[in-house]
Image (tube, grey):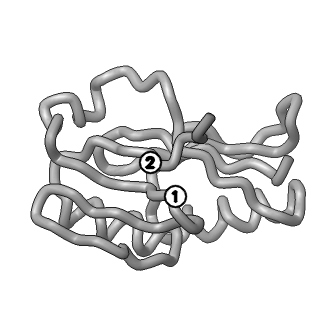
C-alpha cells in the first residue's frame, strides 16, 4: 500500500507563506504557482502551501493537526530551534516543555497553522 506523500497546508497568501516557510525551514520550493507552492522534503514527498481553501486559513479557526519538525540533539536541539525561531519573531504558541516523547514546543505560521518541534523518535 502506498504511503502518504503530499502534506498540504491552507494559507491565505501563497507568496507570504512561501517567504515564511522558506526562511523557517531554510529550504526553497521546487514548484511555484500563484496559488500552490511545493517543497520536496524527501524524494517523492511534498510539503505544499495552497490558497484553494483560504477561507479556512484564518488564525481563529481551530487547528486539529500540526506540521512536525523532528530535530536531532534531543532537548538541546529543540531548545536551539526555539531560540533561533524566537529570534526570527515566529509566534510561539507553547514554549519548550518536556512531554512523553521528549522536549517540544509549538509555533504557528501567520495563518495559524501549528508547527511542533520535537526530538527525532
Q: Residue at x 45, y 50 (%)?
A: 91
Q: Residue at x 52, y 58 (%)?
A: 45
Residue projecting furthest to the front: 1
Q: Which mark is residue 45?
A: 1
Q: Residue at x 28, y 60 (%)?
A: 17
* For marks 2 and 1 on the same chain, the one whose residue lies earlier in the sequence: 2
Q: Which residue is mark 2?
A: 6
Q: Residue at x 74, y 67 (%)?
A: 80
> Does residue 80 appear to the left or right of 102 in the view shown?
left
> Does residue 57 appear to the left or right of 91 in the view shown?
left
- In percent of width and height, residue 32 lies at 22, 71
Crowding near the residue tagged with mark 1, few <14, some 14–19, many ≥20 C-alpha atoms within 10 Å: some
CA gap, disc 2 and disc 1: 6 Å
Q: How many marks?
A: 2
Q: Helix, strand or loop at disc 2?
A: strand
**93 or 115, which is in the foreground?**
115
> Does residue 41 appear to the left or right of 47 in the view shown?
right
Determine the image quadrant of residue 102: top right
- In percent of width and height, residue 118 lies at 74, 48
| Quadrant housing the N terminus | top right
**6 or 78, which is in the foreground?**
6
The reply to whether discs 2 and 1 touch (Cβ–Cβ < 8 Å) is yes
Amino acid at each position: 500500500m502506498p504511503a502518504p506523500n503530499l502534506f498540504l497546508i491552507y494559507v491565505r497568501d501563497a507568496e507570504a507563506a512561501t517567504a515564511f516557510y522558506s526562511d523557517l525551514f531554510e529550504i526553497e520550493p521546487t514548484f511555484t504557482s500563484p496559488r500552490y507552492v511545493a517543497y520536496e522534503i524527501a524524494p517523492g514527498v511534498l510539503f505544499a502551501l495552497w490558497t484553494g481553501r483560504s477561507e479556512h486559513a484564518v488564525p481563529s479557526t481551530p487547528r486539529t493537526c500540526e506540521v512536525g519538525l523532528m530535530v536531532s540533539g534531543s532537548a538541546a536541539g529543540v531548545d536551539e530551534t526555539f531560540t533561533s525561531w524566537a529570534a526570527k519573531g515566529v509566534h510561539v504558541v507553547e514554549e519548550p516543555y518536556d512531554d512523553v516523547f521528549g522536549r517540544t514546543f509549538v509555533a504557528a505560521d501567520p495563518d495559524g497553522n501549528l508547527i511542533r518541534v520535537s526530538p527525532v523518535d
